[in-house]
Image (cartoon, rainbow, N blue to C red):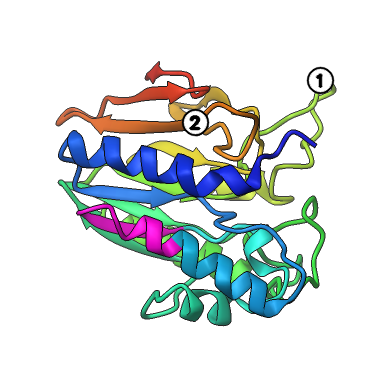
């Protein structure tokens, strides 16, 4: 369709060059590092290529799992091939006085993981055990502003109010946990290639435009002030926001 997969390595390199020029300390890929190849060996080659480019960033790097990453791999297999250790699909970390939470929306309704193509891109869930962990993790860090990172969306709606296909099916339950925590400033997500922005009950939901779409690049630099104001400086097809 409109995806220029073979141009993505060049686009990512340009993105990271900008990050390095600006002296950024943290870079995050929001999932779908690769697309499907003809075979498993081809996908491993694609992972090595893209992670090699990602390694040109001079600061801390994090990966969020996307559905395309799991076409031929289990989550542990993909993360191991990408050199991520330990191979956790959801976790939290601290950077610059901000608590970051990485969520994994690549689960079936009753909890099992997407793995080796056993999934539908439009029927994703955040697992029950992960929801319990999320509530506990945010409660432990109530004094810190929090940013949540996920590939699938937590707020996409159709005109009739029904959940859009790009949202996890239990998005309402996930948002309830975030709202009850009281310290989540923004959710930054991918999956919906055009990108979007909305604000619900005090939390901003920023959906980044896909780097793979069309000829233009698309990436952003997020800034979080001491009082919790979040802004996104967009490049290429990515819009800018201050929320």
Residue 15 % position (x, y): 37, 38
Residue 239 % position (x, y): 48, 19
Looking at the picture, tell me which residue is in the foreground, 123 or 135.
123
Could you tell me which residue is drawn at 32 percent across and 45 percent down?
A: 146
Which label's residue is closer to the chain start, 1 or 2?
Answer: 1
Magenta highlight range: 51-63
- In the picture, the disc for residue 24 is none
Relative height, residue 186 to residue 97 (above, below): above
223 displayed left or right of 81: left
Residue 69 lies in the magenta stretch: no
Helix, strand, or loop for circle 1?
loop
Determine which quarter of the picture holds residue 45: bottom right
Relative height, residue 217 to residue 132 (above, below): above
Distance from the alpha carbon under mark 1 to that under mark 2: 26 Å
Helix, strand, or loop for circle 2?
strand
Q: Residues within 10 Å of mark 1 (few under 14, many from 20)?
A: few
Residue annotated with mark 1: 159
Residue annotated with mark 2: 218
Q: Residue furthest right?
A: 160
Residue 20 % position (x, y): 21, 42
Residue 27 % position (x, y): 32, 49
Choose mark 1 or mark 2, whichever is in front.
2
Could you tell me which residue is drawn at 69 percent across and 51 percent down?
A: 170
Could you tell me which residue is drawn at 19 percent across and 36 percent down?
A: 21
């Amino acid at each position: 369709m409109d995806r220029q997969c073979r141009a993505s390595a060049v686009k990512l390199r340009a993105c990271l060059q900008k990050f390095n020029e600006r002296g950024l300390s943290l870079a995050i890929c929001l999932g779908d590092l690769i697309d499907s190849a003809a075979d498993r060996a081809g996908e491993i080659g694609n992972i090595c290529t893209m992670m090699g480019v990602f390694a040109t960033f001079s600061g801390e790097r994090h990966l969020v799992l996307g559905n395309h990453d799991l076409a031929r791999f289990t989550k542990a297999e993909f993360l191991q091939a990408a050199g991520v250790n330990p191979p956790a699909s959801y976790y939290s970390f601290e950077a610059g006085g901000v608590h970051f939470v990485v969520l994994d929306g690549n689960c079936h309704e009753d909890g099992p993981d997407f793995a080796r193509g056993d999934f539908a891109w439009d029927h994703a869930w955040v697992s029950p055990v992960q929801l319990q962990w999320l509530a506990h993790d945010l409660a432990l860090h109530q004094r810190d502003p929090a940013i949540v990172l996920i590939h699938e969306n937590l707020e996409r709606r159709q005109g009739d109010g029904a959940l859009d296909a790009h949202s996890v099916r239990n998005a309402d339950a996930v948002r309830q946990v975030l709202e009850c925590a009281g310290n989540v400033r923004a959710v930054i997500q991918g999956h919906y290639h055009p990108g979007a922005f909305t604000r619900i009950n005090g939390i901003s939901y920023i959906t980044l435009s896909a780097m793979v779409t069309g000829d233009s690049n698309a990436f952003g630099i997020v800034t979080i002030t001491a009082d919790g104001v979040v802004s996104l400086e967009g490049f290429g097809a990515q819009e800018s926001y201050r929320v």
